[in-house]
Amino acid sequence: MRSKRTVCAVAGALLVLTAGCTGGGGEAAPAPVSARSATGDGEADGSAAPSPSASPSASPSASARADPVSIPALIEREQTGSGLRLGRVLARTSAYTRYAVTYEANGLTVSGVMNIPEGDGPFPALVLAHGYIDPDVYVTGQGMPREHDLLARSGYVVLHVDYRNHAGSDKDPDNDVGLRLGYTEDVIGAALALRAWGRAEVDTGRIGLFGRSMGGGVVYNALVVAPGLFDAAVAHAPVSGRPEENLDHFQRPDGDPVVERIEAEHGTPGENPEFWRQVSPLTHAARAADPLQIHHGTADDTCPPRWSREAAAAFEAAGADVELRTYAGEGHTFGPRWRESMDVTMDFFARHLR
């Protein structure tokens, strides 16, 4: 395993000693942890690339004048996460207990659910980033039930993020016009809150990220905004790494008025190409320091498979450690080969988190 895990394990041990616990009662929350302090400075359709040669902290496009709606702005901002608290028990099984949870991410309270395996910890943890569900109908923990159950039964603490504007999370009225970049902050905050938690159930030196569909795009963003925070990341059936393609594919055909508001504020790709370059994680792919595995079905008519091919090629060309797996005949949500895709996913996490 890379030396980063050792560094994170030491950092996690220090947090346990200094921060204390934050359980479901009225205990004081530990001080926020920032991404900077936590990270330090199917068929195979692609293979892992060599480790990045460029420093992951280097970002030639980040500047003090970065547009507030941009990847460079997220890079410049000190990301924080803290105050993870267990709420009521939602379910008990022979393999794990499911809790409602809340935590703080950059000043917002974010809700979610957590599955904690039975038995002696500490267990490696996975942060889950779900796909798009209308926030008006979304309920806490919705979106990846099969993954929640299987991963917890396989010995992972699973923290499913509700995102801002969802379920019991705080509201952010500018998030949609901000191209939903706030979801990236929520996921980074979840990992930081896990690292600061200080409880025996979680091994703070072994944390992975798993997203599907829109959550796969969140995975790409998190890897370039906070390189080194996660030990490994997986994206299933992800959206495009180019936000303008997502607008054109999902929102513009439905007449979503948010598209007009975004373009009134920032211009179209033709009018302001630099803005659209800077909101794409692929522009900053050289910053990615954590192994990434991408899964996509060849019959996906929701997120075209070419999006994953293009993302994998961009990360590989930038020197990132990326692998693309494709599944003949599988659609967006995966059917007969879902378990196969999850076995590959769990093998990948086992290599990097076990």
Image: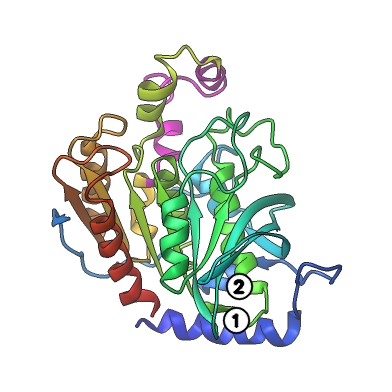
Which quarter of the figure is the N terminus placed in?
bottom left
Q: Mark 2 points at which residue?
A: 195
Q: Is residue 60 in sight in this rendering?
A: no
Query: How many other residues sit within 10 Å of disc 1, few (<14), some (14-19) or many (≥20)?
Result: many
**Kind of residue sitting beneath label 2:** Arg
- Counting from the top left corner in percent of width and height, residue 285 is at 34, 53
Q: Is residue 315 in sight in this rendering?
A: yes
Magenta stretch: give its range.
258-281
Q: Quadrant of residue 248?
A: top left
- Counting from the top left corner in percent of width and height, residue 319 is at 25, 61
- Mark nearer the N terminus (2 vs 1): 1
> In the rendered structure, are the residues bearing label 2 and label 1 in contact, judged by CB atoms less than 8 Å apart?
yes
Mark identifier at residue 12: 1
Which quarter of the figure is the C terminus placed in?
bottom left
Location of residue 39 with respect to 146 vertically, above or below: below
Q: In which quarter of the image is residue 136?
A: top right
Residue 27 on the magenta segment = no
- Residue extending farthest to the front is 94
Q: Is mark 1 on a helix, strand or loop?
A: helix
